[in-house]
């Protein structure tokens, strides 16, 4: 691990911080800090230094996605340590971590199911509102045609079509009851949304579906963007890292990545040292 020592010499002032988000399993957030890839603190209380294995795992955290970051890896190291303390053996620690992941997965599934039901209800409501908009527009178009000089010709054409097809072509496209139901539905919707009368219906409906003035993602997808789901996803990610630390796969992967290209990490350390000197 001589190359690892070379890297660490260039990273004495590197600081990585993780702040845990409140979630159903842990509603008291805590903060973890690692300095120089070695010194470890929990809420400013010093913890045992990172071991060589933990240092290498933290160093090689890929960051290929939003979950395998250096910050989340610090949380994974802390969790792995805590689970080890409460376990009689490595196998028991692995089992406890796996059970925690299953519990988080179940919690997330239940929350998502609840949101999906709400999304379904809102989608039906939005579709109904859109339907009543089409009713309003069709009636407005009909009334406009009836007030035009072409009305007699149009009505004659519709009378002929009615005779030929034996289907109604005369009269308004929708009943007055349908129009009135739509008007009441939209009045109630505007009241619920606190919308001013001058806000166009299409704009209001778009805001309702996308929580934005622009179409983005899927309708009502924003309902899944909750702090609770976000914290559970992060908890799942850090617990997954903890499991990989406990079963040894995280160290094997890190050792392999580091041995493939140690100069890459050493170069990072030197660049970090230069930046510190300039400051």
Image (cartoon, helix red, strand yellow):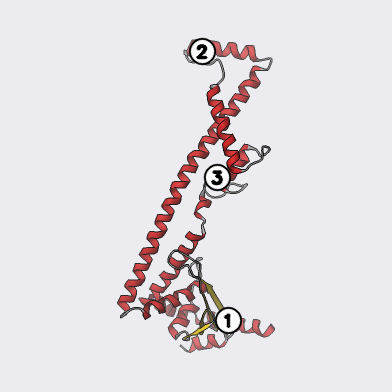
The picture quadrant where one finds residue 99 is bottom left
Q: Quadrant of the C terminus?
A: bottom right
Dot 2, how many residues are within 10 Å of its Cα: few (below 14), some (14-19), or many (20+)? some
Q: Residue at x 44, y 85 (%)?
A: 51
Q: Earlier in the sequence, mark 1 or mark 3?
A: 1
Task: Give the residue pinned by disc 1.
Answer: 14
Q: Earlier in the sequence, mark 2 or mark 1?
A: 1
Q: Which residue is mark 2?
A: 162
* Badge 3 density bin: few <14, some 14–19, many ≥20, Cα 10 Å: many
Q: Secondary structure at mark 2?
A: helix
Q: Nearer the viewer, residue 244 or 183?
A: 183
Is 113 or 263 nearer to us in this picture?
A: 113
Seen from the viewer's position, the closer of residues 114 and 138 is: 114
Q: Residue at x 37, y 68 (%)?
A: 100
Q: Which SS class for mark 3? A: helix
x and y, in percent, of residue 183 in the image: 58, 30
Pair 1/3: label in front: 3
C-alpha span from label 1 to label 3 = 44 Å
């Amino acid at each position: 691990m001589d190359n690892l020592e070379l890297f660490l010499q260039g990273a004495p002032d590197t600081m990585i911080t993780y702040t845990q988000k409140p979630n159903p399993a842990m509603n008291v957030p805590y903060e973890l800090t690692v300095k120089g890839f070695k010194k470890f603190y929990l809420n400013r209380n010093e913890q045992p230094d990172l071991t060589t294995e933990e240092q290498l795992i933290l160093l090689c955290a890929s960051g290929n996605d939003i979950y395998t970051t250096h910050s989340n890896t610090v949380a994974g190291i802390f969790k792995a340590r805590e689970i080890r303390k409460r376990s009689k053996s490595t196998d028991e620690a692995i089992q406890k971590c796996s059970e925690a992941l299953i519990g988080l997965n179940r919690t997330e599934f239940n929350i998502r199911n609840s949101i999906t039901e709400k999304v379904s209800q809102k989608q039906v409501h939005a579709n109904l509102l859109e339907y009543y908009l089409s009713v309003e527009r069709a009636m407005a178009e009909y009334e406009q045609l009836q007030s035009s000089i072409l009305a007699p010709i149009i009505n004659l054409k519709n009378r002929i079509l009615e005779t030929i097809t034996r289907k109604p072509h005369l009269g308004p496209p929708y009943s007055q009851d349908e129009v009135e139901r739509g008007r009441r539905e939209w009045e109630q919707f505007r009241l619920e949304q606190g919308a001013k009368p001058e806000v166009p219906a299409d704009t209001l409906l778009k805001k309702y579906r996308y929580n934005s003035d622009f179409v983005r993602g899927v309708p009502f997808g924003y309902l899944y963007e909750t702090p609770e789901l976000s914290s559970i996803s992060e908890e799942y990610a850090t617990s997954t890292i903890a499991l990989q630390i406990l079963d040894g796969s995280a160290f094997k992967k890190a050792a392999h990545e580091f041995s493939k290209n140690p100069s890459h990490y050493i170069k990072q350390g030197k660049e970090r040292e230069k930046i510190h000197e300039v400051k």
